[in-house]
Amino acid sequence: MRTNDTTAAPSSDSDALLVQRTLAGEMRAYELLVLKYQRRVERLIGRMVRDVDLVQDIAQETFIRAYRALGQFRGDAQFYTWLYRIAVNTAKKQLMELKRDPLVFQSALKSAEEDETSSSERELTHGATDGETPEAILASKEIAEAVNAAMEALPEELRMAITLREIEGMSYEEIAQALDCPIGTVRSRIFRAREAISARIKPMLDRQGGKRW
Amino acid sequence: MDASSDSQRHPSGEDAAVGVQLQQMSACLDGELSDAEFSDVLQCLDRQSGGSMRQSWTAYHLIGESLRGEIAGHRGLAPADFLAGVRGRLAEDAPVEVVPPSLPLPDVSQPLVRGRAANDAVFRWKMVAGLASVAAVMAVTWGVLGTGPSGVSGPVMAQRGGEVSPVVAVSATPAQESTTTVAVETPQGTIIRDARLQQLLADHRQNGMSALQMPAGFLRNATHDNARGR
Amino acid sequence: MQVIFLHPLLFMRSWLTGTPRRWGAASMVALSMGWCGVAAAESSRSINEWLSRMHEASRQRAYVGTLVVSAGPAMSASRIWHVCDGTQQMERVETLTGAPRTTIRRNSEVITFDTEAKVAWTEKRESLGLFPELLRTPSNLIPDFYAVREQAPERVAGHVSDVIELQPKDKLRFAYRIWAEKKTGLVMKLQTLDERQQVLEQVAFTELQLDAPVRMDKLKKQMADTRGYEVLKPSLRKTTPEAEGWRLREPVPGFQSMSCHVRESEGSAAGVAPMQWVFSDGLASVSLFLEPYDPKRHAEEGQAATGATHSLTRRMGEHWLTAMGEVPMSTLKRFAQNLERAR
């Protein structure tokens, strides 16, 4: 049974597939990994570094390094654990450079990594809208509200399927048994649930629709 | 028994194909997609529809993260921007770089070391009749353009970064303490070495006026013009 | 509900960074026409607005970075620390190539340490304090002599930047291409281009950390700590061209007289040190150095160039002229032709 334990990595099987394809030269597969783990990496680094621009910088840098080092990733370990270490090392390296610098305030840099166990996130206080043109910000609170509203509007069987998958972490096989239906049905229902909910949150991702991706 | 139909609706043409791939992406997210099916997904990602597929992929993930409370309070860069950033950086590191032909791309992957010119208080002035590429990193050098009334000619000297061993100055003045003018011919043109010109350049830089001075101009001068002959 | 303002050009960004960099001007215009109906060549800001913004950017943010200067094959690099506290700006530049030098600036005061020779030069650079006030005065001729065009945004050192070109309206000056970080306006890269749009010189950050917490108190200490150094202070005597006996028959279009001084050092007789007469069109500077002709020292007439700076030396009667500036040689010649003794 899954709890709100964010240290548990998402299913590793898709990662293995994506990593494999990346190593085979498919950049598109790597892009999917980036999109998948962006927020987790940002959150992790945000615990170590206060400056928002720097967090994004280091987060992007993390994915660059991971890409370059992908050949060294041994498939037996979980990809996210490996990525996690790279994120921490990248952030530490940046901080070390700043730390070695006698001209830089040490108190403005936070101390080293904390364990990623807490699911309640501290608001990042750095305002993005001080009159400057901001990057598009992903505002999670809005998204959470929209997801909840969409969930309530879903037909029962779709809501059930996605809940068992996302919150209980059950496999398609397990869900098929629990609901007493074919696996193909499980796959279809989960997909349709996602489509219905996505319709509500896509506008928040990107004000221009899918064109910018 | 299901009350609803579990069969896919069938929109026409490309939409249908994308619909199938979207369902495959959904399964991929759950680790339930075969390698063979993933090939279809990859193909679709390369096409026009790729953008909206990536958007869906991200949205699907956000749903799960949201349901599990993993994103509460998080404010981060929009995924499209983040991905663009990563793509951009990967592209930057690639060897393909559009470089103006007259300017070699500064190679910052090399460790920056102090050249032997560090101790050379009198810098060399290179005369560039165009876009010469004289070897090695040299501090400010002046290149001669066109011909002055007393055109310079003299022994040919190989130019390398660092010290130039004493050269016979042809039409220039005999060596004086503070103003030594030395002329050197290279395949790319005539190089002059003129401490005085260097000094004036420093004065010119310090007292020049430009809206571009801050910060670029000032930083440039503090970085590039290192001769202090005074 | 958060209001997010998205500048039209933002929409182009992920296309641009995601695609190979070889877009042509035509396709760029097509892209932008589709998005916001404004031709890519038009600028969203006036030339003065751009320049003011660039100037202000460095006055409001702290940063640490690495700067590389390229002029032809010559390349120099330095590490930069910059901090401001609302009233003061401080900067430290440490060379990574060539002679080891550390330059520290507080507003207009500059000290340069030669860490090997143990000599330090202090100076007050008035020119550093002039902008942006100068931009706002009626005597600001920059818009009369340069036009601004905006290009597609690009990344420099990981920072998305607006790209603008300042194109001269005549042949007496060079063009500039400037990359300004999008959020702050900080200049990330600057190229000086000749009439064929060839790059004469480039200054660029190869890495930059905005808002790095630089310690101003430490910089102040370093600036004041001259122990072990011989401190030299150049003495400049302000003067006027008229007082020194010079004038321009005809002004060179766009270039205004900015200042005139004589550098005096110990032990040199009066009148020996060259007089420096500085002109500027707002972006480019020209210095005319005049000193008494001395056949022992002044033998070479000629023209030379380094990076974007050109120089012209010639005899003028009893005097020796060295004209120098980040302008085409023809401009220096024009100065030389118009220069004459006034008494």
Image: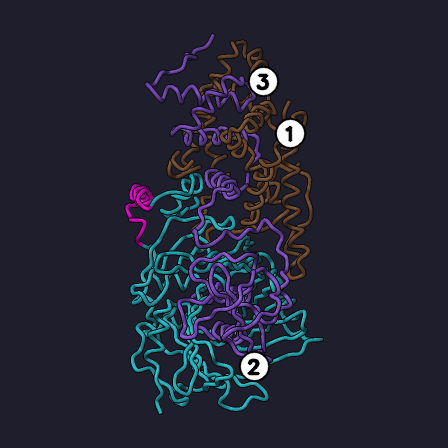
Image location of residue B80, percent across then percent down: 46, 38
Image quadrant containing the N terminus of chain A: top right
Q: Which chain is cyan?
A: C
Task: Identify the colour scheme used.
Answer: by chain
| Residues marked 3 and 1, same chain | yes
Count of all numbered marks drawn on residues in the image: 3
Image location of residue B91, percent across then percent down: 49, 41
Q: Name the residue under label 1.
A: A8
Residue plotted at (48% across, 35% down): A145
> What are the residue bounds of the magenta stretch?
C25-42
User: Nearer the viewer's eye, disc 1 or disc 2?
Assistant: 2
Q: Considering the numbered disc 2 on the image, is that residue within a helix, a strand or a loop? A: loop
Q: Considering the numbered disc 1 on the image, is that residue within a helix, a strand or a loop? A: loop
Display colour for chain B: purple
| Chain letter behind tag 1 | A
Display colour for chain A: brown
Residue A56 vs C286, above or below: the answer is: above
**Amino acid type, callout 2:** Pro
- Quadrant of residue A66 in the image? top right
| Chain letter behind tag 2 | C
| Residues marked 1 and 2, same chain | no
Image quadrant containing the C terminus of chain A: top left
Q: Name the residue under label 2.
A: C234
Question: Which mark, by number, is residue A171?
Answer: 3
Gap between marks 3 and 2 measured at Cα: 79 Å
